[in-house]
Amino acid sequence: MDYRPVTPSLVRDLRTIVGEKSVWIDHERLEAYAHDETSITEYAHAPEAVVLPTTTEQVAQVVRLANRERIPITPRGAGSGLSGGAIPIHGGIVLSLERMDKLIDLDLDNMTITVQAGMVTNDLAHTVAEHGLFFAGYPMSVETCQIGGNIAENAGGGKAIKYGVTGRYILGLELVTPTGDTLWLGGKLAKDVSGYDLKSLVIGSEGTLGIVTQAIVKLTAHPKAASDLLVLFKSPRAAIDLVPVIMRHGIVPTGIEFMDRLSFQTSCAYLNESLRYEQAGAMLLIEVDGNDPNQVEADLLAIGDLCEQHGALEVYVAEDRNAVERVWAVRRNIAEAFKVASPVQSLEDIVVPVARIPDVIPELERLAATYGMQIPCYGHAGDGNLHATLVKDPAMDHATWLRSKDACLRELYRVTRDLGGKISGEHGIGLKRKAYLGDVTNPVEIALMRAIKRAWDPQNVMNPGKIFELES
Ligand SMILES: Cc1cc2nc3c(=O)[nH]c(=O)nc-3n(C[C@H](O)[C@H](O)[C@H](O)COP(=O)(O)OP(=O)(O)OC[C@H]3O[C@@H](n4cnc5c(N)ncnc54)[C@H](O)[C@@H]3O)c2cc1C
């Protein structure tokens, strides 16, 4: 793909649009935008310029310029992505939404909040919580990621069993298309079948179909009570086998998070956290919420009894919010902890129907033995979504690691497909899984995706090279 470079004259044009101080071209700052949280360093690629607009009109003008001059443009939220989506592999412009973090409108009558796309997800949650309202999006990166990034990845997280993923709460979004037009898709509407559902097409499209500049987010009443169980098991298999049993029991938990021993211990060490459950080979962190505290407690105890009947070693009811938050912090920090402890690794995101999740653990154990690597595992077990993490043995040389990782991933993805699953539940394809998508996806489906991309982005300037190559 032939793209034009960002020339000094283009930098002047960008500065005319967003202001002198909102276009960065110095090496040090560009390097900071060369990667996201994906641990695979070979993907790193710096942009030629970082642009920091504050308004939708500025975004539209920058995109029109990029489209006219055929310069690749990569939208970026907080850069917490785990598939390389915000990495500008063709250089060009990174358009960072970090300064577009304003509250536009809190509409208590319609139970919606409208925000600029760069608002940090936790800030949104706290803003609405002050009014007794609830935004159910809870990716484990909630303290840093942005609502625009959540929309682009259709982020899931720790409350998805009961509340679903991000897309369920996005009633409307303002989009700057790859050719620089601005439009609203959806609105403050409970339903809408007025033509193709383009809003849903944008959700999860990883920044390849345009830049989300504002979003209308649906809110619900804040649940009045929530409580958690920490359940210890002898082995990962014992813990995971219980997940479908809990799910069909009739109580819908908010989340069922799974951590094996290595994941838990690595995160505890990273946080300097002294929680000690040495006897456990794996654990489930189960949350129940609702409006009646007695019912929440009864539901939690019923799930606890079920776990005991099915071989749990210990069932702990978290007694206070502080204790709960400590365990959730351990869960939220596993990905980061592994990055520090084992920088050469591949964090996976497979998702299978929840009834098939017990089949995954023996497969991971088999793959670990076959390819000579550790594969610790954690994740949103109640969604069938596991973050198996392939970790390089320090004794393995790098070339062997690359070969083994590739073969192991191909096998893991085939197994996942055969279980009725997909290779990413929430982190996306981005760069990381692009080479594998074709192995496990109907070619007609990929051809339709390419046709959509060509129709939306004839110059292929909007986050090019992500999900699939445009030319096969
Ligand atoms: C410790 C940790 C825990 C995590 N836990 C979870 C989890 O539980 N669930 C989960 O789903 N994910 C999780 N993630 C992954 C990541 O946080 C999510 O994918 C998040 O939604 C990315 O948001 P971001 O603002 O950082 O986006 P970025 O990483 O900046 O970008 C991600 C993608 O979205 C595009 N994009 C960003 N903003 C926009 C926009 N305004 N318009 C159009 N495209 C845009 C980018 O081009 C890129 O393709 C985790 C990450 C970390 C580091």
Image (cartoon, grey):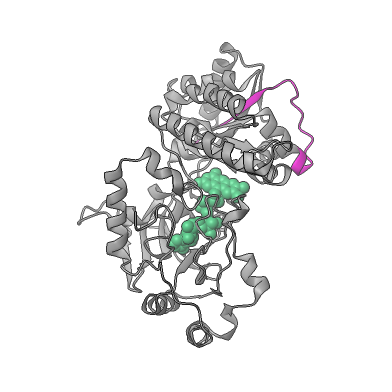
**Foreground residue among 399 and 233:** 399
As for residue 275 lying within the magenta part, the answer is yes
Q: Is residue 276 above or below residue 128?
A: above
Which residue is drawn at the image coordinates 75% and 43% (left, top)?
Answer: 271
**Would residue 189 be found to the left or right of residue 80 on screen?**
left
Spot occupied by residue 449 in the image (x, y as percentages of width and height): 31, 52
Spot occupied by residue 139 in the image (x, y as percentages of width and height): 54, 46
Is residue 78 in view? yes
Q: Is residue 299 above or below residue 107?
A: above
Q: Which quadrant does the N terminus fall into?
A: bottom left
Name the quadrant containing residue 464.
bottom left
Which residue is drawn at the image coordinates 47% and 31% (left, top)?
Answer: 384
Region of the chain picked out in magenta, as a range: 269-290
Which residue is drawn at the image coordinates 39% and 40% (left, top)?
Answer: 439
Spot occupied by residue 57 in the image (x, y as percentages of width and height): 41, 78
**Would residue 182 be found to the left or right of residue 335 on screen?**
left
Spot occupied by residue 71 in the image (x, y as percentages of width and height): 44, 74
**Would residue 344 be found to the left or right of residue 355 on screen?**
right
As for residue 174 lying within the magenta part, the answer is no
Name the quadrant containing residue 206.
bottom left
**Foreground residue among 44 and 271:** 44
Is residue 140 in view? no
Picture mark count: 0
Which residue is drawn at the image coordinates 53% and 54% (left, top)?
Answer: 84
Name the quadrant containing residue 437.
top left
**Would residue 355 be found to the left or right of residue 145 on screen?**
left
Q: Is residue 444 above or below residue 150?
A: above
